[in-house]
Amino acid sequence: MASRGAYTSVAQTEDANVELTAHGKELENGTSFEAINGQSRSKSLDSIESPISHDEISADDYATLPRVADKLPWGAFLVAIVELCERFAYYGLSGPFQNYMSNKYHDPNGLPGALGLAQSGATALSNFFQFWCYVTPILGAVIADQYLGKYLTIKYFSIVYMVGILILFISSTPYSIEHGGAFPGLIAAMAIIGLGTGGIKSNVSPLIAEQVRSEKPFIKVVHGKRVIVDPEVTVQRIYMVFYMCINLGSVSAVLTTLLELHVGFWAAYFLPLIMFCVGFFVLVSGKKNYVLKPPQGGVIGNCFKALWIAMRNGFDLDQAKPSLQHAGKRHKISWDDKFVDELKTALVACKVFLFFPIYWVTFSQMMNNFISQAGQMELHGLPNDILPNIDPITIIILIPLFDRIIYPFLRTRLHLAFTPITRITLGFLTAAAAMSYAAHLQSRIYASPPCFASPSSCPAARLGPSSYAPNKIHVAWQTPAYVLIALSEILASITSLELAYAKAPQNMKSFIMSLCLLTSAGGSALGILVAPLARDPYLVWVYAGLAGAVGVAGCVFYWMFRGVDEAPRPVESAEEIEMEVRGSFGRGRDV
């Protein structure tokens, strides 16, 4: 799942609900664009503060004045609410998936179930669903940037999404399960929901950032002190609210797993359908509050064409430049040299994401193997698939803690630059700690009676004709693993998408965001390869292997990129970022 994935790092600043100084009293009418049926129209943006140019803010001001966020626009809150409803639906329906797929209908272990695919089969299918959900954003980015714009793409793909949830709801009724409709219904629902998710994922994150109307920093006064109101910090604050809404929505799995246990799967899938309809209503009714920009006119298609030319010329992207093409007259192209330089910049900046599939395969364990692990433990009346909700609850608690206490303390008291590369590295190492703990816990399960290395499947555990007792170890021992995963998500997952947004050229935001999401699909593909090993008595080795892999990946990642030692910023030239990354690959020091 990504991950609930994350969208940027927690803002390390305070809000600026303040008055303008004499330097910032000028106002100007701005222009925004709405893409409606492929056409654009402008509208006046009244009362927008005129930002001071970089030249009017002195070097001393940049060095000494704190950067703060501007007041958040109403449109950003509406988009965040839409995402809350979508994530409520996504995690509400995927939370019961592991039980729905792995356990039998009227399972002898007393756990809810429908398909009886066993742990390895359910884990493989779950990983495929996540893989599909993170491949389709490429399609959503192409449609939005080339044809419809972000708003209309989200709107139309939301309808597709609702159809998928409706199919899942119908096929999960007792009648459908008993008559063999559950499995084909699940496959159809996964395909359609994944398609709908892709159309939303790659566009909702850039859409909420586009609600920031100021493009340049300007100066305000906060309680008599001058501060720099920085649009980048405002974007960070918007994404903090956005990410909080994502995790509030993901807590829906608490409700759906309880409905699954006490009512049935049909009820667990009906609730996400209702909530998604609410989000769709908010999306459509709030249209007049959004700042909407028109599609970029074939940017994504041109990206793939340029990459194809580069592949045919020894992966040399310079060969796609018109200045070279016109000389040789080899290809008919519709872009300029600057476009190729921007594409080169974006692709080089995304090299840091090559390590993330290893992280995502460890992250995804909490949505499949951790649930099955809980089923081997004493639940004391709890559903075994309610435990993953510890992760979003932990994140909801930790985000304000990081925002208001930890980051300011590191920055102002210890004078430490907690850079993105450092955060991502620590996120990888924290994920390794989570997998190490899971391996230790699995070894304790195998060391516990009555079934030891064969939980809930030995004669000593039989309670009746069709029920078995779990091994004698309390399910609460899973809590530290979820807390560690949540901490790693704040450090690695959120920061990765901060880099994707900050480094991407302005006309490639959706495209680069979709590439970043694609790393989660890579993690799901790795998870499919690991799934056949996810069975007793080999689970200790599975968790230990994942711990070693993500730990080594984190160390290698830091060694390769530790020279890129600065906060994310928009990259102006391909040469600049090329020098940064070459330095991190080659010398491994500051450049």
Image (cartoon, rainbow, N blue to C red):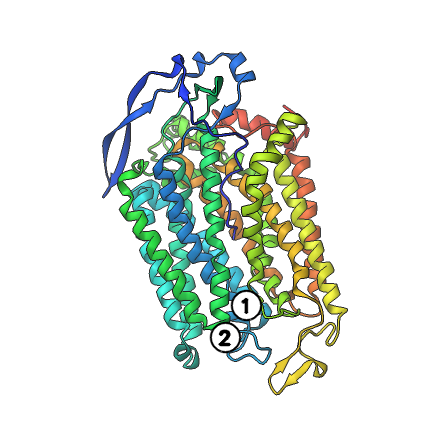
Amino acid residing under circle 2: Leu
Residue denoted by label 2: 115
Q: Which mark is residue 122?
A: 1
Q: Is residue 488 left or right of residue 29?
A: right
User: In terms of sequence position, does the residue under pointer 2 or pointer 1 come before the other?
Assistant: 2
Residue extending furthest toward the front:
223
Q: Residue at horizontal 38%, vertical 26%?
A: 214
Give the secondary structure at mark 1. helix
> How many numbered badges does the structure rendering display?
2
Image location (x, y in percent) of residue 194: 42, 57
User: Is 568 located above or below residue 372 in the figure?
Assistant: above
**Crowd around label 2: few <14 · some 14–19 · many ≥20 (10 Å):** some
Nearer to us in this view, 255 or 439: 255
User: Is 376 located above or below residue 6 in the figure?
Assistant: below
Q: Mark 2 touching mark 1, by CB under 8 A?
A: yes
Amino acid residing under circle 1: Ala
- State which quadrant residue 472 falls in: bottom right
Nearer to us in this view, 401 or 377: 401
Image location (x, y in percent) of residue 41: 22, 34
**Crowd around label 1: few <14 · some 14–19 · many ≥20 (10 Å):** many
Q: Residue at horizontal 53%, vertical 22%?
A: 66
Q: Residue at horizontal 31%, vertical 56%?
A: 159
